[in-house]
Image (tube, rainbow, N blue to C red):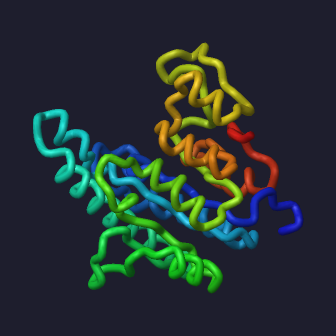
Amino acid sequence: MTSEIRYRRVLLKVSGEALMGSQGFGIDVAVADRIASDIAEARRLGVEISVVIGGGNIFRGVAVASKGGDRVTGDHMGMLGTVINALALRTSLTKFGIDTIVLSAIAMPEICESFSQRTALAHQAAGRVVIFAGGTGNPFFTTDSAGALRAAEMGAAALFKGTQVDGIYSEDPKRNPDATRFERLTHDEVLGRGLAVMDIAAVALARENHIPIVVFSIHEKGEFAKILSGAGRATIVSD
């Protein structure tokens, strides 16, 4: 079965909002468990997986700036939210027998290990799922940018972006049912058309490192493994 796998090493970007489920805030454990089960299924295919997780279900730094507050402090608060989500996802993964480690871009040794590329690669080589928390560790950078950065550092064959819909559309399909869905795009087309699937820095970084971006619905059970196996429904952004 592993001979059919399209990508052998991937980074999965999961938004914080994905963990909310139907709640308006926080973490729905059932949803975290379902996402973890999808990761576990993909891991059992023999795929090396690392994860970058957002924190929007808990806090967004831009919310502070929009009200006249300090953006740097706000972004630091958002980074702490990603650590909470990473610990929750690790807890869910352990329920499925998946050995998992959380590495944070912000040092907090009592809670999790600190990130370094060497440490991350060693954990992945040992068969663990590696969850990256704390974004890039710098303000003014989104967790999308962290996803592209970690994908490059880990030598990922693809960056998977789990979203609310099954690919990239010309407009929000929830607002415009007639929006056009794209099967394939180049990085330059995404940037040139202003398609808001990831921020500009993330797409540019993926382009510079020749990393395909695979955009799919994080809410479709089993879709992650299907796409890895050459099936499923997604938009692929590549050179």
Report the quarter where the C terminus lies.
top right
Residue drawn where x is 18% and y is 38% of the image: 65
Question: In x, y percent, where is residue 24?
Answer: 29, 43
Question: In x, y percent, where is residue 237?
Answer: 68, 39
Report the quarter where the N terminus lies.
bottom right
Residue drawn where x is 51% and y is 55% of the image: 147
Quarter-wise, where is residue 168 in the image? top right
Quarter-wise, where is residue 128 in the image? bottom right
In the picture provided, is 133 more to the left or to the right than 160?
Answer: left
In the picture provided, is 196 more to the left or to the right than 152?
Answer: left
Question: In x, y percent, where is residue 28?
Answer: 37, 56
Q: Is residue 211 visible?
A: yes
User: Foreground: 164 or 120?
Assistant: 120
User: Foreground: 210 or 213?
Assistant: 210
Residue drawn where x is 27% and y is 46% of the image: 60
Q: Is residue 31 above or below residue 126?
A: above
Quarter-wise, where is residue 228 in the image? bottom right
Q: Is residue 133 above or below residue 189?
A: below
Q: Is residue 61 above or below residue 41?
A: above
User: Foreground: 206 or 9?
Assistant: 206
Residue drawn where x is 17% and y is 53% of the image: 73
User: Foreground: 133 or 211?
Assistant: 211
Q: Is residue 97 visible?
A: no
In the picture provided, is 84 more to the left or to the right than 178?
Answer: left
